[in-house]
Image (spheres, rainbow, N blue to C red):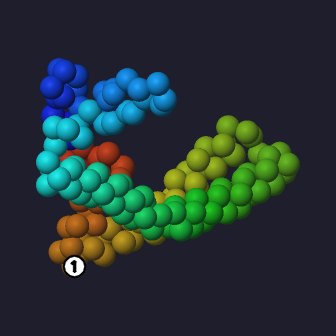
Amino acid sequence: MKLHPPTPSGRSGAGSRARVGRGLGRARVRPACACACAPARLRACADALIREALDDWQREIRGYRAVDTIKQLRDGTQDLSEQELARALKALESGKPAADVLTQLSRNLTNKFLHAPTVALRSAAEQGDLSLLDATHRLFSIDETEDSD
């Protein structure tokens, strides 16, 4: 988004600087748009910058809302994983074939991870609440054109 018009020298206004005066002391430097923009234009530029910064800040704050949910989801999933791993290790120690133990571990993890979400999805569908189904499609990148079994 270009906020400043070109200066009379042809330079773009955003970020460029033009020298003013050539005294023996310090050279005065001014933003290129200072001479080309009326005060109302400068106010509009400042308002646009403030709105953009405010939008960025609000987006960041909204993102923080998800942090606790994500942490709880990860912690709960990790707890289930550790429980199933302990079960699998016991099965291996008792002499069960590794392939059987790994197959059971995989099946148990899938069932435990998806149990609560599938119960909630069924309940929502029964009540006619399709928003949860739509959210699930977005969350898991499920193609809506596929037929279910």
Vertically, is 117 above or below 17?
below
Residue extending farthest to the front is: 24
Vertically, is 61 above or below 16?
below
Q: Residue at 67% across / 63% down in the picture?
A: 79
One can see residue 136 in this view: no
Q: Nearer the viewer, residue 64 or 77?
A: 64
Quarter that holds the N terminus: top left
Q: Which residue is mark 1?
A: 127
One can see residue 90 in this view: yes
Vertically, is 19 above or below 91?
above
Q: Residue at 58% across / 54% down in the picture?
A: 109
Secondary structure at badge 1 equals loop
Residue extending farthest to the right is: 93
Q: Amino acid at mark 1?
A: Gln
Q: Nearer the viewer, residue 22 or 6?
A: 22
Q: Nearer the viewer, residue 77 or 109?
A: 77
